Image: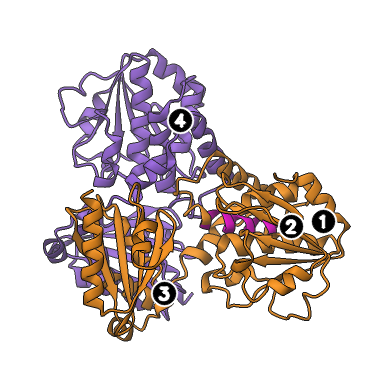
Chain colours: A orange, B purple
Amino acid sequence: MNNSFKEIAAEIKKAKKIVLYPHMHMDGDALGSCVSLCHVFRGEGIESYVYIQEDIPDNLKFLDNGYCTSDEEKVKNADISMLVDSGELKRIKGREDAFNSGKTSICIDHHETTAPFCDFNYIDSKAAATGELVFELLNELGAKGDSVTANALFAAITTDTGNFQYSNTDKLSHEIVAKLYDWGLESSKISIEIYENYRLERLKLEAEAMSNSVIFGGGRAAITTVTQEMLRETGALMNETESIVDNLRSIRGVEVAILLKEEEEKLIRASIRSKEWFDVAELATAFGGGGHKHASGFTSHKTLSETWEDAKREIEKRLDL
Amino acid sequence: MNNSFKEIAAEIKKAKKIVLYPHMHMDGDALGSCVSLCHVFRGEGIESYVYIQEDIPDNLKFLDNGYCTSDEEKVKNADISMLVDSGELKRIKGREDAFNSGKTSICIDHHETTAPFCDFNYIDSKAAATGELVFELLNELGAKGDSVTANALFAAITTDTGNFQYSNTDKLSHEIVAKLYDWGLESSKISIEIYENYRLERLKLEAEAMSNSVIFGGGRAAITTVTQEMLRETGALMNETESIVDNLRSIRGVEVAILLKEEEEKLIRASIRSKEWFDVAELATAFGGGGHKHASGFTSHKTLSETWEDAKREIEKRLDL
């Protein structure tokens, strides 16, 4: 059972120090939600930090604003530890002890798999983004929204709805964004930071991967690779490959798309996506990996061409079911 | 001076036959706006068509729904000719006579350069999409929105706001989309139709154009081309090039992006985009074209390489101001 935002707001108002925990491999929703909360808390005179232990992805660095810290000393003795956009301690690996040292714990999340385990929980798997729940909480807190808050929440919502394209996007997503303009939202500036800030090297790599792509399974599947040679040629980095599999999926008629990343000669990482009905979590599991129905991955210790053949065969088998 | 939507609605209610004219090189806003109007008109018992003389771009074909015609006979003797998303007869070349044969003319548009010349005009350059104006007009008409109308207007708004990223996107854009859900909007289905429905040929062309792109102006400008040879090589069509200039603009540090499309040896069409401050309408005007501050175009009757040099020179001049 969820607590009410009223109960959670009351708890927050009693606190002198609150530390926020975005999940590892942070995304726009996790970091944007945390930053907006941290900004409002500090405005209320509460000492607050977003505690992280990894680099912020390039296109989300603008969110930091001095709220993020990796300093263990700073986050000690919190009145509240707040888990944002995840509901499992294993998703804040390396930070669990700090989290558990908070006097009270709060979880705000929208993942389906999240089971409430904190002292206070608000988990709504119907919300398109945790940022939408944070918006409601901030209103309950009586926050006077400003552009920092609005921009961070917009970053949360636009990234987790795939720019308002994914099926989780609904009326409320657009209503909340409309209201964020009253707080000073700079949607164009934020969209440029997030979506128009790619290195040329990255785009050249994406282009090469698309040029090399192969359609199979009667037009219902697409596969491509990123090799070490392609990285050398284009100057791109392996962590700049995340759009490639989405680009493959955007091909007409393609239901399932797979990208094979050659980390080493016999270390291949696969990213898999599906559009509507294909269960790529099940496919990944067959290769010892895992994920969600529409997004998953696995690691292979065979060569690139062996992995390519294995993946094609397993996908074709499932397309023919 | 604009007429009011009330005046325009009154005129529409008197009509027995209305023909809608999207501009040539139709886009989602032109076609989506026309289709939503046509659907509502037919629902009111008005004979109505969207008159076109070119192929509908592949990812907008779902909008047709039997409303579009190229049959000159069908569009004769209209009570109203309605120009949608453009304000110049030259943008409906080949259809001017039919347009002028309508007893009354109406223009609904959001382009800055549009000067009212129809009997009734509603031109608002602050609107992010003509679809937003059409939404207001439909409300004035008392239309009971349904999913066909909602999906067509969503297509109009999502494409002209660049998926809610462009600087024209504002509170009203999101408020209108939120209201479209009440009419039965299927936003995810439409987003897949528009954004995940690309022919492989198109994506291979985009890849080649990106591979050939050149950065200049100290990293602040990017240019690329689509030649007839590239179309032959990839099997893509010239109407499948619209994402290319946006891809160029998404390069970090690039303020202005330009795509040169070789229609014939001495017929080059340029699409220009800017990110923040560069006024591409002014640039296009210098070449006899026009558009908005962040999106414009022009036609050149020089060769591709001459146009390339001209464009580079004019852009560099303006970057150095």
Q: Position of residue A43 (x, y in %)?
A: 81, 62
Labels 3 & 2 near each other (Cβ < 8 A): no
Q: Which residue is mark 4?
A: B184
Residue B177 belongs to the span the image colors magenta: no
Q: Mark 3: few, some, or many residues within 10 Å (few <14, many ≥20)?
A: some
Q: Secondary structure at mark 4?
A: loop
Can you tell which of label 2 and label 1 is closer to the viewer? 2
Asked whether the residues under the numbered discs 3 and 4 touch, taking CB atoms below 8 Å apart as contact, a structural biologist would say: no
Tag 2 and tag 1, C-beta contact below 8 Å: yes
Which badge, 3 or 2, comes first in the chain's sequence?
2
CB within 8 Å, label 2 to label 4? no
Residue occupying image coordinates x 22% and y 56%: A317
Q: Nearer the viewer, residue A171 or A16?
A: A16
Q: Amino acid at mark 2?
A: Ile
Q: Comparing marks 2 and 4, which lies closer to the viewer?
A: 2
Query: What residue span does the magenta drawing correspond to?
Result: A148-159
